[in-house]
Image (tube, rainbow, N blue to C red):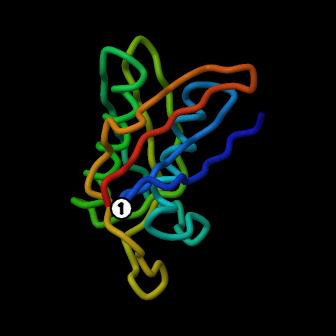
Amino acid sequence: MPGRWEHYAHDADLGVRGHGDTLAEAFAQAAIALTAAVTDPDAVRPQTAVAIACEAPDDELLLAEWLNALIYEMATRRMLFSRFDVAIEGGRLSAKAWGEPVDAARHRPAVEPKGATYTTLAVARGPQGWTAQTVIDV
């Protein structure tokens, strides 16, 4: 199954879900779903790379750490990201996220993500590949 992302409804917040052949690809697709909560990911130019690293004792907590690290970088750098190169080994994630500064006129941000929650947090491998999902507070 090629990598893909999707949103799912959850009360006032928004669910993000990534699918991929590998765990790393599912995490990258979940990151694109995070960007898509704010703007069209295709409108974000991958001009500047930002290194991100995090770790956690299991895949579910690692997903929350990953998305929260991205939200932190988005907020402090005032950037949006559209391309992700993720590597995961032994509970450690290292990644590069490519993006550009927010251009309000062009990106037209819809919401500001505040954080990844543990609500519906799940990472699983199935017959079609990996799925990584959680709800983000917006």
The tally of labels here is 1
Q: Nearer the viewer, residue 101 or 128?
A: 128
Q: Nearer the viewer, residue 57 or 13?
A: 13
Residue farthest front in this picture: 11
In the picture of the structure, the residue carrying the numbered disc 1 is 12
Which image quadrant: the N terminus? top right
Q: Is residue 29 above or below residue 138?
A: above
Q: Indicate the position of residue 121 as horizontal and vertical percent values.
A: 41, 33
Q: What amino acid type is highlighted by mark number 1? A: Ala
Q: Residues within 10 Å of mark 1 (few under 14, many from 20)?
A: few
Residue at figure coordinates x 41%, y 63% from the top left: 80
Residue found farthest to the right: 1
| Spot occupied by residue 100 in the image (x, y as percentages of width and height) | 43, 66
Instruction: Tell me where residue 47 appears, x and y as whole percent.
Output: 49, 62
Residue drawn at (40%, 46%), measured in percent from left and top? 135
Q: Position of residue 73 (x, y in %)?
A: 29, 53
The kind of secondary structure element at disc 1 is loop
**Residue ranking furthest to the top:** 90
In the displayed structure, 103 sits above or below 82; it is below
Q: Residue 56's quadrant in the figure? A: top left
Judged left or right of residue 98, residue 115 is: left
Q: Nearer the viewer, residue 82 or 64?
A: 64
Which quarter of the figure is the C terminus placed in? bottom left
Report the side of 69 relative to 42 (left or right).
Answer: left
